[in-house]
Image (cartoon, helix red, strand yellow):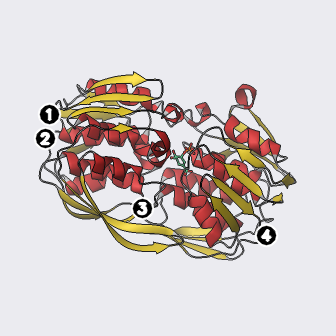
Amino acid sequence: MEQLRIKGGARGPHGAIAVPGDKSISHRAIILGGLAEGVTEVSGCLRSEDCQRTLGALRALGVEADGWEGDLLRIYGKGLRGLREAADTLDCGNSGTTIRLLAGVLAGQPFLSVLTGDASLRRRPMDRIIRPLTQMGAEIWGRAHDTLPPLAVRGGSLIGVTYRCPVPSAQVKSAILLAGLFAEGPTTVIEPAASRDHTERMLTAYGQRVERREREVTLIPAGTLHATPISVPGDFSSAAFLLVAGLILPDSDLTIEGVGVNPTRTGLLEVLQAMGGKVQVLPVDEKIGEPRAHLRVRASRLRGVTVGGDLIPRLIDEIPVLAVAAACAEGKTIIRDATELRVKESDRIRTIAGELGRMGVRLEELPDGLIIHGGRRLQGARCESHGDHRVAMALTVAGLQAEGETIVLDTACIRTSFPGFVETLERLFPDALERRG
Ligand code: S3P
């Protein structure tokens, strides 16, 4: 089993660095590229295991693609009616985005598809997509009374619906909107709080009519998707690990270049700034409706904050590393309204509380969040990733700050979202990391 050994007491990082392409945007570019008429060139496409699962599934459904050439992927779209039944099950690996978004596409296809994944994915709730997609007219079966993967999807003629999501989830919203491409009439999704809106922005770039009000989006399907070049910005969720490392380590002055700063993703920036973190946003440009900026971070004295409500969906993936920042801050940080963390790649409330607890952090687990008592020096420890990439990377950042050595076990999962994470840290912190296994 792969593991990372991290020497604690690292000095802060300096200079400039880039992070790989945004995972959410890359998945969507691959899917919409496969459904478009014409050739989609995706530059900056994230070549992680999760995105490779999406591409593999589309290839199994008849889509051709060249790549990757570096981070360029060329997809030969089949058009909305061009997919064909796959000869085998579609293995989505660890990727919730792959299984849920593809289920939306497959709900509109006149053939049978079976979607499965690894042990973690097979524990994640799928009733949240099965309910709306069956309302639209698809037939979907799953394990555990139609709640868990594997899923069998028999698609067909769909009708547009208005669906009120019980939880804010971009994966659910996107599954419904993608099914809406194949439906008769408009499809509306209403969310309890705004989730990331990359699907809406990209559908617009592909020539679809998307009408938006605050927590509501309507797709009026326009038939053909027209291929368009996609330039993927750096992944804010990957940059988050470097941002926090920059804040909590002494003397740092690091610029992370070309990061996507779509406001539905950057809740962490607001929280870190409210904690006293010195983070500057230097805008660069906007492509396919996605803004990009350089982020400059300097070592800072942080203080605890309270985080909850509508902000949560805008930083949901960053809570593991926010917990590390909170552990290094003066005073108490309270995170509420984040029950969704319990159904991520691991139960992140439990895994973060348990693993940071091993490093000497005082935390209280709440049903919907965490209370973190910051200010004590972290202690190096032997920690588990629980197969969760974001837990593995957050613990690695914690290990850089800690006193003594930290071992993070089971780190192969990092490749699902941030290939090159270890190499990036090796560049910023020469001699601090050792890879085993
Ligand atoms: C994602 C949506 C979020 C997020 C996940 C990626 C997406 O999940 O946590 O990492 O690409 O749509 P939920 O939709 O379950 O909130």
Q: Distance from label 4 to label 2 (Cα)?
A: 57 Å
Is residue 154 shown left or right of residue 305? right
Q: Amino acid at mark 3?
A: Val
In what element is the residue under mark 2?
loop
Three-letter code, disc 2: Gly
Residue marked by disc 1: 403
Which of the 4 image quarters holds residue 204?
bottom right
Looking at the image, which residue is at 57% across and 43% down? 93
Distance (Cα) linking label 3 and label 1? 33 Å
Q: What residue is disc 3 on?
A: 261
Q: Vertical placement of 78 versus 154: above or below?
A: below
**Mark 1 or mark 4, earlier in chain:** 4
Specify whether residue 306 is in view. yes
Q: Residues within 10 Å of mark 2 (few under 14, many from 20)?
A: some
Residue at mark 2 to residue at mark 1: CA–CA distance: 6 Å
- Look at the image and tell me whether residue 69 can be seen: no
Q: Is mark 2 within 8 Å of ligand 1?
A: no
Q: Residue at x 16, y 39 (%)?
A: 8
Reading the image, the residue beneath label 4 is 223
Residue at image mark 2: 9
Instruction: Tell me which residue sits at (69%, 77%) in the image.
Output: 38
- Sequence-first disc among 4 and 2: 2
N-term mark: 2 or 3: 2
Instruction: Answer few, some or many: residues within 10 Å of disc 1's Cα (few below 14, many 20 plus, some between 14 and 19).
Output: some
Q: Amino acid at mark 1?
A: Glu
Q: CA distance from mark 1 to mark 4?
A: 59 Å
The first of marks 2 and 1 along the sequence is 2
